[in-house]
Image (spheres, rainbow, N blue to C red):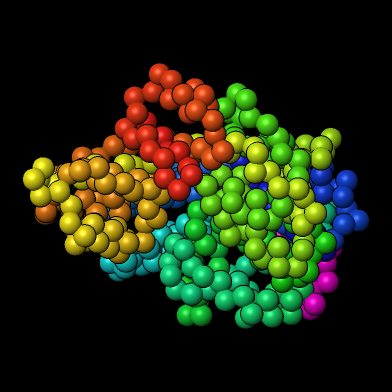
Amino acid sequence: MQVYKFGGGIIRDATAIEKLRDFLVQNKNDKVILVLSAIDKTTNKLEKLISEFLHEKSQFYKSFNQIKEFHHGLINALNFNSSGAVEKNIHDLFDELNAKFNDYKQQEFDFLYDQLVCFGELISSKLISCYLTDQEIDNNWFDIRAYLKTSDLYRNAEVKEDVSKGLLNQYIQENTSRLYITQGFIGSSEQGHSTTLGREGSDYTAALIGNFTHAEKVVLWKDVKGIYNADPKNYEKAILIPELSYDDALELTKLGSKVLHYKSINPLKELNIPLEVKLFDLAVESGSRICSEAHPIKHIPIIVHRFNKYVLKIKSTPKKGFSKKDEQYILDSISDTRLVINFHVTKGSVKYVCLNNFPELILRIMVQLSKYYHIEVFDQVCMIKVKNGRQEIIDHLSEGKDLLISELHDHIHYLFYT
C-alpha cells in the first residue's frame, strides 16, 4: 500500500485533473490510497463565505453561487462521457452545505467553521472519484469522517489514533480495491460532528493513514521539486535538500515551512515509513526523501516566509509598562480564541503579537484587549524566520523592507514587515 496526497493547487483545474488521471493509469499496478484536498483555493473561499454569512448576507449568496458554479464549470470542462451521476452528487453536497448554513443557531465560530469548511474536501474528492469512474478507472470513494475519529476541539482536533486505526483497517479489509479515494484535513467527533485538523492538515491525514495501514511509503505531490531550505519563489538562492532525517524534517515544520505539516512526521517516524515530497509531473523526478538513514543538515541555513499575518501592537502607559499579570491576561485572551501565537515580544511599554489570518477572531481579541490597552493592528504582514543564517543573509532579507520587528530569539532570527 502507498499513500498519495494531492493538495488543492495540484488539482486546481480540468487540465490538472486529467493529468492526475494519466498518472494513475501509468501507476495502475500500485495499491494506493489517494488523499485529496479541496480544489484550488476553495478552503479560502469557504472561510470568506462564513464571514459573509455572519456579517454581509447580500454578498454571501453571490459568493455561494460562485463557488458552486466553479465546480460545475469544472465538470463541464472535464467532458464526462456521462455526467448525470457527478452532477447529482455535487448538487446534493451543495444542498447539504446550504442546509448547514440555514440550520445555524448561534453556535461557536470554531464549531460552525468545521461543519462548513469540510465540504471543500468532500466536493473535490467526490468530483474526482466520479471522473475517474467515468474514465473506467475503478476506485473506492470513502468519507474519512467515518473512520478518523477526533476530539471535539474544533479547528484543531486531536485524532484518537487507536480507534481510528481499527475503523480504517476494518474498512479496507472489507472493501478490496487497488485505488481508494478520500479526504485530507477533516475528521469527526464521537458525536458525529465534522472536525478539522488545522490548516494544511491533509499532509497529516496522509501520514496517519500511512501509519495505520503500515504503508510502503507516503508521497506528498506538490508544485515544487521537493523540500528546499527556503521557498524558491521568495529566496533566489534556495537549494533543494534531496534527503533529510525525520528530526530535521520536524525541525523544519516547527519553523513554519509550508511544504510539510508539523504533525506529519512522527506517525511515519514511528514505523520508519519513508515520506517523499515530489513535483507532480508525469516525468517524475526524485524530489526529497525523509528517512532514518539521512545525514543531518545543521550546516544549511533555513529560511521560512509566511505571509498574510496579523501583528497586534499593544501599548501600555509608558510609566506602567507590562506587569506579569498584564502579560498573562493578553496571552490568555488570545488563547481563548484558539488562535496560534506565531511570535510575541515585549519592548518596554509595547508588546507585539503575531497571529494567523482569522479576522473574525482577531476582532474578538481586539474588543477584549482594547478595554485596557491601546491596540494598533497591522495586516498583510510577512513573517520571516531564519535559522543557521549568517548576518549577510539577514541583511539581504531586510534590504528595502519597512521592518516592524527584527528580533533574535532561541537561535532564530525573526523579521516582520508590511
Name the quadrant of the N terminus: bottom right
Q: Assess whether residue 178 is covered by the magenta stretch.
A: yes
Q: Residue furthest top?
A: 400
Say which of 396 and 411 sits in front.
411
Q: Which residue is painted at 72% across and 71% down in the image?
A: 212
Say which of 37 and 298 sits in front.
298
**Does residue 269 appear in the picture of this structure?**
yes
Say which of 303 and 24 sits in front.
303
Residue 141 position, x and y percent, is: 70, 63
Query: Is 364 placed left or right of 128 in the picture?
Result: left
Say which of 76 and 46 sits in front.
46
The vertical placement of 125 against 45, above or below, is: below
The vertical placement of 141 against 291, above or below, is: below
**Does residue 63 appear in the picture of this structure?**
no
Q: Which residue is painted at 56% across and 71% down in the image?
A: 159
The vertical placement of 210 against 261, above or below, is: below
Residue 85 position, x and y percent, is: 67, 57
Q: Assess whether residue 220 is covered by the magenta stretch.
A: no
Q: Which residue is painted at 40% across and 55% down in the image?
A: 340
Query: Is 332 placed left or right of 212 in the picture?
Result: left
What span is in magenta? 173-183
Query: Is 379 placed left or right of 154 in the picture?
Result: left
Residue 62 position, x and y percent, is: 38, 43
Q: Which residue is painted at 77% across and 63% down in the image?
A: 272
Residue 10 position, x and y percent, is: 66, 41
